[in-house]
Structures are given as structure tokens and as C-alpha cells.
Amino acid sequence: MTAGEAIARTDGQIVDANGAKTIRNGMMRTVHPGDLLYVPPGVAHHFTDMKGFRAWLIRYDVEGWAQSIQPAPAGRGGQ
């Protein structure tokens, strides 16, 4: 995280709730600037912007050994 505050939801099941996807039965934690959150491949995750959430997304794909680094758009979570 580089700025703001967000709620990170991980490790649960992705379900449809009133037309929007969300995570049920997972873990919730508040993340702040300076925090690092590792999400293993295949693990459901979602971020909810609370106060100007800004973060760097670092994605590493073992298959094909491709690496990409890009900033997350302001005010949006990843999944």
C-alpha cells in the first residue's frame, strides 16, 4: 500500500450478492500505507477502498517466467 486505507478480504468463497461479487467466510484485515499483502495464486481476494486506497500491484507468473509491475487504479480494488 502506498496511501489511504482499505479492507482486504481473502481466503473465502466468491459469491454473488445482489448482482455484485463478494467474498464470504474469508478473513478481513485493514491495510495501511507501508503494508504488504501476499496473496498466493488461486486465492480469492478483494479490496474495499476506505480512504483513498492506492497500491502497487506486483504480479509474478511462474508459468512462462513473465513478470509485470503496475500501479492499481486509484479507488479500485483488485481481484
Image (cartoon, rainbow, N blue to C red):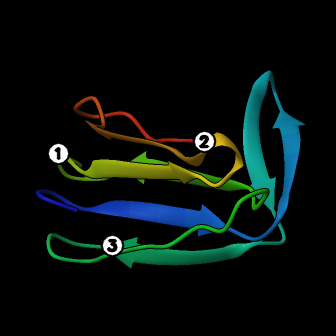
Q: In the displayed structure, would residue 2 be above or below residue 15?
A: below
Q: Horizontal placement of 79 versus 78: left or right?
A: right
Quadrant of the rendered structure where residue 23 is? bottom right
Quadrant of the rendered structure where residue 15 is? top right
Point 37% across, 52% down: residue: 58
Q: Which quadrant would the C terminus be assigned to in this image? A: top right
Image spot of residue 10 (x, y percent): 66, 67
How many C-alpha atoms fall within 10 Å of the one at disc 1: few (<14), some, or many (≥20)?
A: some
Name the mark nearer the viewer: 3 or 2: 2
Q: What residue type is labelled 2?
A: Gln
Point 59% across, 67% down: residue: 39
Point 76% across, 72% down: residue: 26
Q: In the displayed structure, would residue 74 be above or below residue 33?
A: above
Which element is circle 1 on? loop
Image spot of residue 44 (x, y percent): 74, 56
Q: How far apart are marks 1 and 2 (CA)?
A: 18 Å
Quadrant of the rendered structure where residue 4 is? bottom left
Q: Which amino acid does label 1 sit on?
A: Gly
Labels 1 and 2: the sequence-earlier one: 1
Residue of label 1? 52
Q: Which quadrant would the N terminus be assigned to in this image? A: bottom left
Residue of label 3? 31
Residue 79: mark in rendering: 2
Image spot of residue 12 (x, y percent): 82, 66
Labels 3 and 2: the sequence-earlier one: 3
Name the mark nearer the viewer: 1 or 2: 2
